Image (cartoon, rainbow, N blue to C red):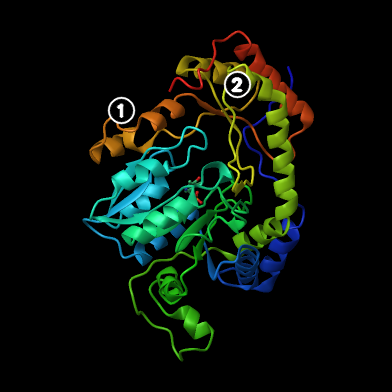
């Protein structure tokens, strides 16, 4: 039998071990050493972000964003249901209420036409999630936020090195968050960053990140001792993680090109199936530059999706579905949601399959995935792209 094709394989660029060795030999492994600093500066300069603070995860960056936005009971935060649990948890743990908005059927990003209807006098923030590294409709979201006085916090976990109108995802809201988890484009095992595009928030963010102390100001010589000044937690990554991450960030262009090659390879091998309406492929709107975080196909119905995943898995191919919509999870039900509330999200999430996509995936491996899809779909019914 042919070798297995995993869903994901973290890609090492080659300099990671040297950088990690440098840290181990330096005598200091804790946070905010030279590599943490280098990563932050690289991200700030490349993406035009006023301040980047590295964190242990995107989850912790989202928690910091929620704390910085001073959200609490009675506040509502608009976000998609088609996202990872951390997007909602970060706000829920401050006592705010996640309000789920349906998505567009092409990009699976929040549908801005439905966003305005969801705004109430209690709405305080919008959290656009850039699914698969394809930007949300940030012009419309920015306009709405301005008109209603709302904070925009981008969950750009999947959107590192992707752009909207030439501007980096994560640089467009007041705050943004990145992930460097193993499954994302640039990895250090577990890691993340908070992007601060509102300079007035920088000082408080540093304090929250450093256990509620003014340690950063002390290290810069701005105060002569460091002390407890506010509520906070430990949202700092180890210097070992940052060393690993720095190697990856330096290779950002190479990593993105490799992913693009795989993404375009899938598109080329599968586009005739889309023309014959056997499946739907991802869309990248005109204003967006993707980082090719993922490639999905949407089948005609749930049973075709399940047959497709089963067939690919039986052929040793790691194809997977994605989110169980948050509003239809047990926690979503506790928040008062019911199945049927967000029809596009529910419909798409039942029909979506993510294909293996990693930097050193060979053309041969891609062909095997495409062949596997064809073995199921060449005999299936049409997707009915317009029948939603
Ligand atoms: C991966 C992901 C997260 C969580 O990232 P961690 O770094 O694992 O905490 C949050 N939101 C979205 C949309 C993600 O894809």
Query: Which SS class for mark 1?
Result: loop
The location of residue 137, given as percent across then percent down, is 49, 48
Depth check, front residue: 87 or 10: 87
Residue found 54% across the figure and 85% down from its top: 220
From this viewpoint, is residue 159 visible?
A: yes
* Residue identified by numbered label 2: 313
Depth check, front residue: 107 or 233: 107
Within 10 Å of disc 2 (Cα), the crowding (few <14, some 14-19, many 20+) is: some
- Residue 212, quarter of the rendered image: bottom left
Reply above or below: 61 against 377. below
Within 10 Å of disc 1 (Cα), the crowding (few <14, some 14-19, many 20+) is: few
Residue at disc 2, CB closer than 8 Å to ligand 1: no
Residue found 36% across the figure and 45% down from its top: 115
Spatial separation of the CA atoms under disc 2 and disc 1: 30 Å
Q: Which mark is residue 340?
A: 1
From this viewpoint, is residue 3 visible?
A: no
Q: In this view, does 109 lie to the left or right of 23?
A: left
Depth check, front residue: 274 or 199: 274
Label pair 2/1, CB-CB below 8 angstroms: no
Reply above or below: 44 against 326. below
Residue found 50% across the figure and 55% down from its top: 57
Query: Which SS class for mark 2?
Result: helix
Task: Mark 2 vs mark 1: give the one in front.
Answer: 1
- Residue 72, quarter of the rendered image: bottom left
Depth check, front residue: 129 or 330: 129
Residue found 30% across the figure and 45% down from its top: 118
The location of residue 3, given as percent across then percent down, is 73, 24
The location of residue 36, given as percent across then percent down, is 60, 68
Q: Earlier in the sequence, mark 2 or mark 1?
A: 2
Tally of numbered tags: 2
The location of residue 169, given as percent across then percent down, is 55, 55
**Quarter of the rendering occupied by the C terminus:** top left
């Amino acid at each position: 039998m042919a070798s297995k094709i995993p869903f994901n394989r973290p890609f090492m660029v080659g300099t990671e071990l040297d950088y990690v060795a440098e840290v181990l030999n330096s005598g200091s492994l804790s946070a905010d050493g030279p590599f943490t600093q280098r990563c932050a500066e690289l991200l700030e300069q490349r993406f035009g972000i006023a301040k980047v603070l590295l964190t242990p995860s995107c989850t912790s960056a989202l928690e910091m964003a929620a704390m910085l936005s001073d959200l609490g009971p009675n506040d509502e935060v608009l976000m998609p249901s088609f996202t990872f649990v951390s997007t909602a948890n970060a706000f829920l743990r401050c006592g705010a209420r996640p309000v789920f908005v349906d998505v567009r059927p092409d990009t699976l990003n929040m549908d801005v036409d439905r966003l305005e209807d969801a705004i109430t006098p209690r709405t305080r923030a919008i959290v656009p999630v850039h699914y698969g590294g394809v930007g949300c409709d940030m012009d419309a979201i920015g306009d709405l936020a301005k008109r209603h006085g709302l904070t925009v916090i981008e969950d750009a976990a999947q959107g590192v090195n992707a752009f909207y109108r030439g501007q980096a995802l994560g640089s467009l809201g007041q705050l943004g968050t990145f992930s460097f988890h193993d499954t994302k484009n640039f990895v250090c095992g577990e890691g993340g960053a908070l992007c601060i595009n509102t300079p007035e928030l920088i000082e408080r963010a540093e304090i929250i990140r450093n256990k509620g102390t003014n340690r950063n100001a002390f290290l810069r010589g701005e105060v002569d001792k460091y002390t407890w000044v506010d509520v906070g937690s430990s949202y700092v990554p180890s210097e070992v993680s940052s060393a690993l991450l720095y190697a990856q960030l330096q290779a950002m262009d190479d990593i993105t090109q490799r992913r693009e090659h795989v993404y375009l390879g899938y598109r080329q091998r599968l586009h005739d199936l889309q023309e014959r309406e056997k499946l739907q492929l991802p869309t990248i709107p005109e204003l967006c530059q993707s980082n090719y975080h993922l490639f999905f196909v949407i089948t005609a119905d749930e049973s075709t999706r399940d047959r497709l995943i089963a067939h690919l898995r039986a052929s040793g191919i790691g194809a997977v579905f994605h989110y169980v919509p948050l509003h239809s999870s047990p926690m979503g039900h506790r928040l008062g949601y019911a199945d049927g509330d967000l029809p596009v999200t529910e419909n798409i999430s039942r029909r979506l399959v993510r294909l293996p996509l990693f930097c050193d995936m060979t053309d041969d491996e891609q062909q095997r995935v495409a062949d596997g899809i064809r073995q199921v779909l060449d005999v299936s019914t049409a997707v009915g792209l317009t029948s939603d």
